[in-house]
Amino acid sequence: MRRGPKKTIKAYGVRAFLSPHPEIRKLKQMHSPSAHGNKVWKSTWLLIDYLNRKGLSDGARVMEVGCGWGLAAIYCAKKHGAEVTAIDGDAKILPYLRLHAEINEVEITALKKDYTRLRVKDFEQVDVLIGADICFWDTLVDPLRKLILRALRAGVQQVLISDPGRSPFEQLGNYFINRRNGRVLDWTAQRPRRSQGRILKIAQDSA
Ligand SMILES: C[S@@+](CC[C@H](N)C(=O)[O-])C[C@H]1O[C@@H](n2cnc3c(N)ncnc32)[C@H](O)[C@@H]1O
């Protein structure tokens, strides 16, 4: 018997509420995120799948930028014991992020901050910088390129940015290919449903 639309999704040990879930409906009446922060985007599952297959050092210090509902950050905290900071420029995102941290029983630091304003010192306590579906406009290519360069200058060991493969992301990827050990990988995740896309990976030691 059909019981109406699916309200939750679970994969890789983390849980997300979908738009029909009463908690999300309640939040949507009070906070309407702008800049596409209205759901968990598929690129998040690509990034989680990558980390699930390749691993993450226990206790790594992870920063997620443009985190939206923060599932990738939450996965790092829950499955790898990472110390996580999740940043989004939209204050209206934070209640969704906090709700997801709560239902997944993890503690993360959630900050409202424009990632273009992060400076070298902001990355000094960060080992891994991650982002999912954050390079979706041409105007974001240059700020993100500068952000990644600042992170590498601060000593961040690994940068992972996932994307469906939009043209601004490809421009960003092309800059780092053959520079700073950058590679752009084709990636497919099978869970929670099949998604395909690309992952920009930059590792200080070409690991
Ligand atoms: C397409 S959504 C992706 C959200 C999440 N990473 C995911 O995969 O579900 C893009 C996110 O980037 C955030 N964002 C856009 N520009 C930003 C900026 N300059 N600084 C911080 N966050 C930003 C938006 O608020 C939104 O949450």
Image (cartoon, helix red, strand yellow):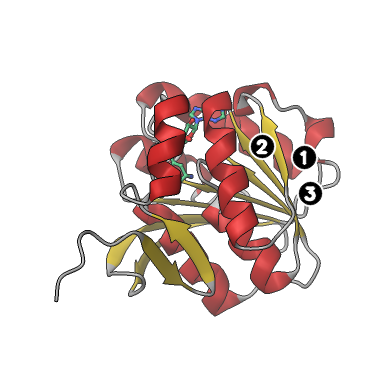
The reply to whether callout 3 and callout 2 are in contact (CB within 8 Å) is no
Residue under pointer 2 = 149
Local crowd size for mark 1, using a 10 Å CA cut-off: few (<14), some (14–19), many (≥20): some
Q: Which mark is residue 193?
A: none
How far across and down, in percent of the image, does residue 108 sit? 73, 50
Q: CA distance from mark 3 to mark 2?
A: 14 Å
Q: Quadrant of the N terminus?
A: bottom left
Residue kind at label 3, given as amino acid type: Val
Left or right, 88 with respect to 20, comes to right
Q: Residue furthest left?
A: 1
For the point 67% across and 21% down, the residue is 117
Q: CA distance from mark 1 to mark 3?
A: 12 Å
Local SS, label 1: helix
Q: CA distance from mark 1 to mark 2?
A: 6 Å
For the point 44% across and 72% down, the residue is 11
- Work out whether mark 3 precedes mark 2 in sequence or the reverse, and give the earlier one: 3
Res 56 visible: no
Q: Quadrant of residue 152?
A: top right
Res 93 visible: yes
How far across and down, in percent of the image, does residue 196 sit? 29, 63
Residue kind at label 1, given as amino acid type: Arg
Q: Which mark is residue 126?
A: 3
